[in-house]
Amino acid sequence: MNKKLLNILCVLMLLCGLSVVAAADLTNHDFTTFKMDIPNDANLTEETGFNGKDVIENAVRSNGGSIPVSDLESDPANTHPVWTDNVNNISIQFINCEEDKLSDHANAMKQMYANSTFKEDSGNLHIYDMSKVSGEGSYGVCVENNGKSVVVITGDDLDLLKKMGESVKFN
């Protein structure tokens, strides 16, 4: 019986070790204006996001086909980079606060994701529930750069988003 128990404990320790190794599969990536750890298997595609304008589709869908004029505040000439990774279901956005006339993460999230809900602060991370924007179980993690810029990471694996957010270093 002791041998069986020892075998079970060995298997459990091996499984725990493998899960820790799998969770740590991140590599540093340079986004020019900031650096951040991303999943090793990430396949990032860069697109152009329109500041505040990309909220229209979600707002119209969530508001029964109409949208308040107050949601149309941003200058459509201003854009920002958005990197998406369909493998890990994540999106990374860099927002220049001065260009968009924003003061902090709360303004950025209100303008970019009108239906997001602030959830909590975790260290220097600001966490949002994105269920009304991207579906049940989705989150947004914001990292601020002293009112100059905000990095917004969205996806459905909150632990992964937090690890990525904790690694952000602004250039």
Image (cartoon, grey):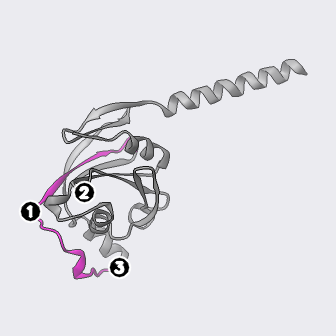
Residue 75 lies in magenta, yes or no? yes
Q: Amino acid at mark 3?
A: Asn
On the rendered image, what quadrant is the N terminus found in?
top right
Q: Residue at x 64, y 28 (%)?
A: 15
Residue bearing the label numbered 2? 147
Q: Residue furthest left?
A: 77
Tell me which corner region of the image, top left, top right, bottom left or bottom right, holds residue 163.
top left
> On the rendered structure, is 10 left or right of 58?
right
Q: Where are the magenta residues, as a range? A: 63-88
Is 148 drawn above or below residue 1 in the view shown?
Answer: below
* First along the sequence among labels 1 and 2: 1
Q: CA distance from mark 3 to mark 1?
A: 26 Å
On the rendered image, what quadrant is the C terminus found in?
top left
> On the rendered structure, is 114 left or right of 24?
left
Q: Amino acid at mark 2?
A: Gly
Q: Position of residue 71 (x, y in %)?
A: 24, 75
In this rendering, the label closer to the viewer, 1 or 2 = 2
Q: CA distance from mark 1 to mark 2?
A: 21 Å
**140 vs 125, nearest the viewer:** 125
Residue bearing the label numbered 3? 63
* First along the sequence among labels 3 and 2: 3
